[in-house]
Image (tube, rainbow, N blue to C red):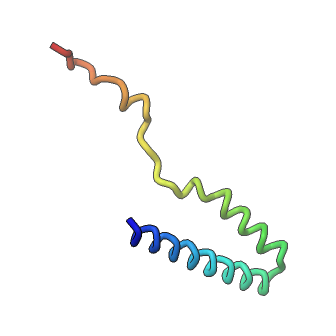
Amino acid sequence: MARTLTAWSIGTEASIAVFSALGAVLAGFTSPRTALAVAGLLILAGPLLLPRREDITSAAEPEQGVTDG
């Protein structure tokens, strides 16, 4: 468990550093306002990148033709 937490912490710190550097590069090429707008749009689009689940209600209903007995 300790190794997992350590790896998670290192990965988190590294990703923060990488994305901060990418934001700084983008701000250098465009403007800070544009870089913040792009970062905000990426944050808002984040949930769209998550895997989708099947319909929960159809998974909870029993199959037709199957009876308990």
**What residue sits 78% from the left and 81% below the top?**
27
Indicate the position of residue 24 as horizontal and vertical percent values.
Answer: 74, 83
Residue lying farthest to the left in this orientation: 69
Residue 28 image-quadrant placement: bottom right
Indicate the position of residue 9 as horizontal and vertical percent values.
Answer: 52, 72
Viewport quadrant of the N terminus: bottom left
**What residue sits 60% from the left and 59% below the top?**
46
Q: Is residue 67 left or right of residue 38?
A: left
Q: Is residue 38 left or right of residue 49?
A: right
**Numbered disc total:** 0
Nearer the observer, 13 or 43: 13
Nearer the observer, 50 or 17: 17
Indicate the position of residue 12 as horizontal and vertical percent values.
Answer: 55, 72
Nearer the observer, 4 or 26: 4
Residue 15 image-quadrant placement: bottom right
Residue 40 image-quadrant placement: bottom right
Residue lying farthest to the front in this orientation: 2
**What residue sits 68% from the left and 78% below the top?**
20
Viewport quadrant of the C terminus: top left
Q: In this view, does 12 lie above or below 43?
A: below
Indicate the position of residue 60 as horizontal and vertical percent values.
Answer: 37, 28
